[in-house]
Image: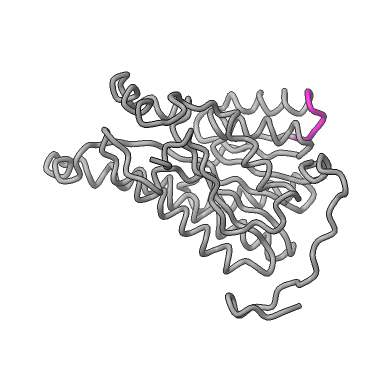
Amino acid sequence: MVRTIATGLEVPRPAPKLPKNVKDMFSLKGKVACISGASSGIGGAVAVAFAQAGADIAVWYNSHDGLIETAKELAKEYKVKAIAYKCPVTDEKKVYDTIQQVLKDFGGKIDVFVANAGIAGSSGSLVEAEERGEASEEWDRILQTNFQGVYYCSKFIGSVFKKQGHGSLIATASMSGHIVNVPQLQTCYNATKAGVIHMAKSLAVEWASYARVNTVSPGYITTPISGFAADKIKERWLELTPLGREGLPEELVGAYLYLASDASTFTTGSDIIVDGGYCCI
């Protein structure tokens, strides 16, 4: 053990024993992974990828109970354990209770937690929205899901990781935590995603002795969450994206797999941007 200046905490000094084959390094066989917001979009793609990589998965949803059947299909196809849980991440007690149930159902451990649940929102100018009486309601709705939800998941899974002595927390942030989107105005969304990135960096230092914490920042991805935008707005998005298109959810799963696997044992406090080059310009 060595006491680091960065944290003031004692952390393990020896390097981990890693598989010799790179395919084994990326394997999730034997790991238990939780994914919130897994009923569709990015979370759904991550759930499939993790099952393909051999992980047993606990997939969370809020309102789309079709995930119950999807979990059964994933379990059958990939020969893993997969169970769906209804858990709105805005409900602190429900988050705690669900994590405890997952521990009971999956042999008392959780190796990976993907805090992915989130919502979009664009109420226009903050001042004009306030004048219409809409700003506070919109802000609270997005803040509670995108930031408080990650906070609730983090603090309860953090206790699990500390007791185990290991774990990987991956939060879905956004390129919107790095840049200001145009032409739509979305101050509250951008602020929550910037907060998630910095929360994760802070936790990476705080938890350095027992767990890793990282984020993935997607750009414009073809998912239901971007359904609020009119075609004319999306055309502007593509003009500002060097690759000239929206990404597919499946184009993100490599980043999540890397952060969940033993290939990333020296990676913590990092944010992986997958945005088709948007943040470059």
Position of residue 185 in the picture relative to residue 27 (left or right): left
Q: Give the mark count.
A: 0
Residue at 59% across / 30% down in the picture? Answer: 251
Classify residue 256 as left or right of residue 55. Answer: left
Task: Out of 103 and 148, give the one closest to the viewer.
Answer: 148
Residue 83 image point, x, y percent: 70, 35
Q: Which of 70 and 179 is in front in this view?
A: 179
Estimate the x, y position of residue 122 in percent, counting from the top left.
Answer: 29, 36
Depth order, front residue of 166/89? 166
**Vertical side of 278 occupied by 108: above or below:** below
**Quadrant position of the C terminus in the picture:** top left
Quadrant hosting residue 242: top left
Q: What stretch is highlighted in magenta?
A: 76-81
Instruction: Name which residue lies at 55% across and 60% down.
Output: 155
Q: Residue furthest right?
A: 20
Residue 104 point in image, percent of width and height:
74, 49
The answer to if 124 sits in the magenta stretch is: no
Q: Where is residue 149 in the image (x, y as percent from the top left)?
A: 47, 49
Q: Does the magenta stretch include residue 77?
A: yes
Q: How is the image coloured?
A: one colour
Q: Quadrant of the N terminus?
A: bottom right
